[in-house]
Amino acid sequence: MGRILVVVALVMALAPATALAADPPTGADISDSLEYVGRVPNSGMIVEGKFDRVEGQHVLVTTGRYGFRTYDVSDPANPVPLDSYQPPEILGANGYWQDEDMQIDNRRKLIIGALDPRHDDVDQTSCPGLGTLSAKNRNPACRSGFYVISYRDPSDLRQIGDFVELPAGHTASCIRGCRYIWTGGPARRDDLPALFPGVWTAFTPGARGDGRPIWVTDLRNPYRPKVFKQPIDLWRNDGATDYSHDVNVDDHGIAWTSGRGGILGYATHGLWRDPYTDRRRRARPWNPVLVAGGGVGGVNQPQTDFMHNSLRPVDGSTHASGVRQGGVLIGTEEDFTEPCDKSGRVVFSDISDSLGGEPAANSTPEHPYRMKALDTFHPAQDDNGEAIDDTLECSAHYFELSGSTLGVAWYGQGLRLLDVSDARAVRQIGYYRVTGSVEQESSNSWDLAWNGSYVYLFDMNRGIEVLKLESSTAAASVSRLRTVRAPDAQADRYAPVPASSLSAGALICPAFKSSGVARASR
């Protein structure tokens, strides 16, 4: 298939890398536990990145509005750009949206890149992600699904096969070593029943449900993917089919789906008792068995209960008294309710009484089930007391665990490092955020990745910023770091503000724009 390199973006991306500065930028608040290593030039519009080794070369694979980009990170303090690829159908140099939890197949060296229907330069009010279209007037430019991109040669990114078109495309997640892909989100669009007759009618949600579930693709042969007709992760929100946002597979093979209605864990192989039928059957990636999870207690917005992403550590790095190993589930609530201290936070749940799946399967609005919260974290809540301008964005987003240290990307609040060795007593041990100016953009952090003690923070505005934790991430080392509180945030007239969302009144994974003052100044 044809291959288009966006010339302007590529020239900028492949410009010779310069040594990263050691001084934090103007407007930065940074804890003593972190060293600021530097900022990668021309790396803005990034959403996500992951590390791999290819023929002995240490590589960072990234995605963003620019499509896909690779870096040589053999020197972790000085990433060197290798190649950039924008799928040919995308309009414009910065038209790719959103692939915010890009997956990579380390074995076959493949990128699984989700494409949200709001991806390109068309008028976004004409895209079905907002649920405004009929099938008759559907804009074909607003397609969704995923691409498969080979990075076997990181200096020569190539598309594998055709675009896989699906009714969903906000995130695409690997199951069983990327042999199967689970694709979910964004919010339900009103043209889906006509586009997929005989499928949607089987699970049309009621008034409470307004989201796309998970579609499953067999990707054992990436040149000939097979899409299963029937979606999964149904009835997730107290009996209503709703928005399935993202999937994380733990080291025991359980796939945890996050979305509106909480976090549900599914087995995809082996014999399990199905809580919906009370019979044992074999779990399959296209027909999994619900085994744990449910609604999440301890969220700031229980009426929404939108859980953005999750992780279940099973290696003993995170424990809680009275909870057996592997019984702690970490999840991010994404929400933009004002004031700041009412927006989304990180929640640590006890899954013990959810095991077997019956509590979630039997949950109803009249008799809801919620997992018990062990602890929560939000910069402006609990025992932190950090004063934050209520006009700024304060929702948690993606996180990554290394040892007992949880790094959390926090939109306008930058990077937060948490000691999660005791899930009943979570502590903040590090922070980094930037309050902007005309020359120095504010934090708009989306994700991060650990590279040993280095933290690569992926910020939509600021690009890739590299920091280093002045400690190992193991529990013994982290326990020696003191609990810290970031300085009170000053009013930031240059901070980004949400520009669009998935549905009216629900700012979930929005696009951002600069504030009016900053925009007028640029």
Image (spheres, rainbow, N blue to C red):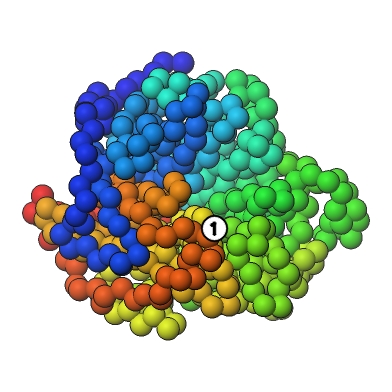
Looking at the picture, how far across and down is residue 342, in whole percent?
41, 77
Please give left or right for residue 496 compared with residue 161 in the image: left
53 up-or-down from 452: above or below: above
Q: Which residue is mark 1?
A: 403
Looking at the picture, how far across and down is residue 403, in whole percent?
54, 58
Q: Residue at x 21, y 51 (%)?
A: 22
Quick check: can you spot residue 425?
yes
Helix, strand or loop under label 1: loop
Name the one closer to the observer, 294 or 27.
27
Count the numbered circles shown.
1
Outermost residue toward the right in this view: 279
Please give left or right for residue 41 compared with residue 404 in the image: left
Q: Residue at x 26, y 31 (%)?
A: 13
Name the one closer to the observer, 37 or 258.
37
Q: Residues within 10 Å of mark 1 (few under 14, many from 20)?
A: many
Q: Residue at x 60, y 51 (%)?
A: 248
Looking at the picture, how far across and down is residue 34, in whole percent?
33, 61
Outermost residue toward the top in this view: 1
Q: Residue at x 73, y 69 (%)?
A: 324
Q: Quadrant of residue 243?
A: bottom right
Name the one closer to the observer, 250 or 491.
250
Q: Quadrant of residue 293?
A: bottom right
Identified by mark 1, the residue type is Gly
